[in-house]
């Protein structure tokens, strides 16, 4: 692969750098690398953590593949990873799942909806139409268990974070942070502009897998009434 760099990440992980931009091409490369390494099951591999333009590969240094006896575990594991990826094909990534998320927009569920509209000279309905009319890609999970960073937000509603973050954002809140949108899986502090809330649980420790969304999934949003929101929360 061209333009791929490796670097150590502590003494039990290495980072594969796959680009400098957040876009669909780099994302496909991230997913292809993960799919290949999951299939290879390298000796000592512990966990893969995909991000916007890189993959963290956690490994057990005591079980690093054999190779140059004088080389460090990092050098031996990096050499094995590089060998596994030498003929990587972008068409080998798994098919994406599409997940529809119901959202009750505005009011007490989305207290920043009007503010987002004001910043772009749009009505609240126009903001909702733009947000619910797009298809989003899960680029990475992070920040909190099950929190998915979604790319694909229309430029017309890309909005900076709030000047003063909230100390407690309710679970299920749908927000906009810059050029991305996302859903808070748990009640937590947060500074994104809140435009709605979903009754869907993004994270459940008793579920397998515990996260609703995975890297690569496609997400769409559907506006629902407060009544439907409450019916779904009681289901």
Image: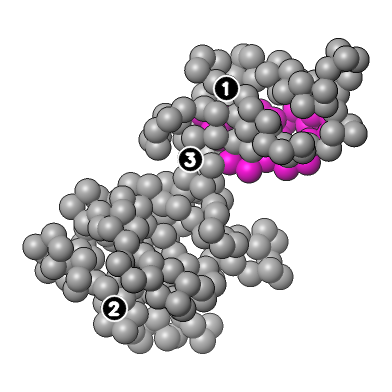
- Magenta residues span 29-50
Going from N to C along the chain, the mark reached first, 1 or 2, is: 1
**Residue found 77% across the figure and 26% down from its top:** 74
36 relative to 132, above or below? above
Q: Nearer the viewer, residue 219 or 148?
A: 148
Residue 42 located left or right of residue 146: right
**Residue found 59% across the figure and 67% down from its top:** 203
Q: To which residue does mark 1 refer? A: 5
111 relative to 227, above or below? above
How far apart are labels 3 and 2 at the CA level?
A: 29 Å
Quadrant for the N terminus, please: top right
- Tell me where residue 93 appears, x and y as whole percent: 56, 32
- Tell me where residue 111 appears, x and y as whole percent: 29, 78
Q: Is there a contact, CB below 8 Å, between mark 3 and mark 1?
A: no
How far apart are labels 1 and 2 at the CA level?
A: 43 Å
Q: Is there a contact, CB below 8 Å, between mark 1 and mark 2?
A: no
Exactly how many numbered labels are in the figure? Answer: 3
Q: Is residue 230 visible?
A: yes
Q: Secondary structure at mark 1?
A: strand
Going from N to C along the chain, the mark reached first, 3 or 2, is: 3
Q: To which residue does mark 3 refer? A: 52
Q: Secondary structure at mark 3?
A: loop
Neighbor class of circle 2 (other Cα within 10 Å; few <14, some 14-19, many 20+) is: some
Q: Nearer the viewer, residue 211 or 160?
A: 160
Q: Quadrant of residue 131?
A: bottom left
Going from N to C along the chain, the mark reached first, 3 or 1, is: 1
- Tell me where residue 215 appears, x and y as whole percent: 54, 46
Residue 195 located left or right of residue 30: left
For residue 111, the mark is 2
**Residue found 33% across the figure and 47% down from its top:** 152
- Disc 1 versus disc 2: nearer the observer: 1
Instruction: Indicate whether residue 201 is drawn in magenta.
Output: no
């Amino acid at each position: 692969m061209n333009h791929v760099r490796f670097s150590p990440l502590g003494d039990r992980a290495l980072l594969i750098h796959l680009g400098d931009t957040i876009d669909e091409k780099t994302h496909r490369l991230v997913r292809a690398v993960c799919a290949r390494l999951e299939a290879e099951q390298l000796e000592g591999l512990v966990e893969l953590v995909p991000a916007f333009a890189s993959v963290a590969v956690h490994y057990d240094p005591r079980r690093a593949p054999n190779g140059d006896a004088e080389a460090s575990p990092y050098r031996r594991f990096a050499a094995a990873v590089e060998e596994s990826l030498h003929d990587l094909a972008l068409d080998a990534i798994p098919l994406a799942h599409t997940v529809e998320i119901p959202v009750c927009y505005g009011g007490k569920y989305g207290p920043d909806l009007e503010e987002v509209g004001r910043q772009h000279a749009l009505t609240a309905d126009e903001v909702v139409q733009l947000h619910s009319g797009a298809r989003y890609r899960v680029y990475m999970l992070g920040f909190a268990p099950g929190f998915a960073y979604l790319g694909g937000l229309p430029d017309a509603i890309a909005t900076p974070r709030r000047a003063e973050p909230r100390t407690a954002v309710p679970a299920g809140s749908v927000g906009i942070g810059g050029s991305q949108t996302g859903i808070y899986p748990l009640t937590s502090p947060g500074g994104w502009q809140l435009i709605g809330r979903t009754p869907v649980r993004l994270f459940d420790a008793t579920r397998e897998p515990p996260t609703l969304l995975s890297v690569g999934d496609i997400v769409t949003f559907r506006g629902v009434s407060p009544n439907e929101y409450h019916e779904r929360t009681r289901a």
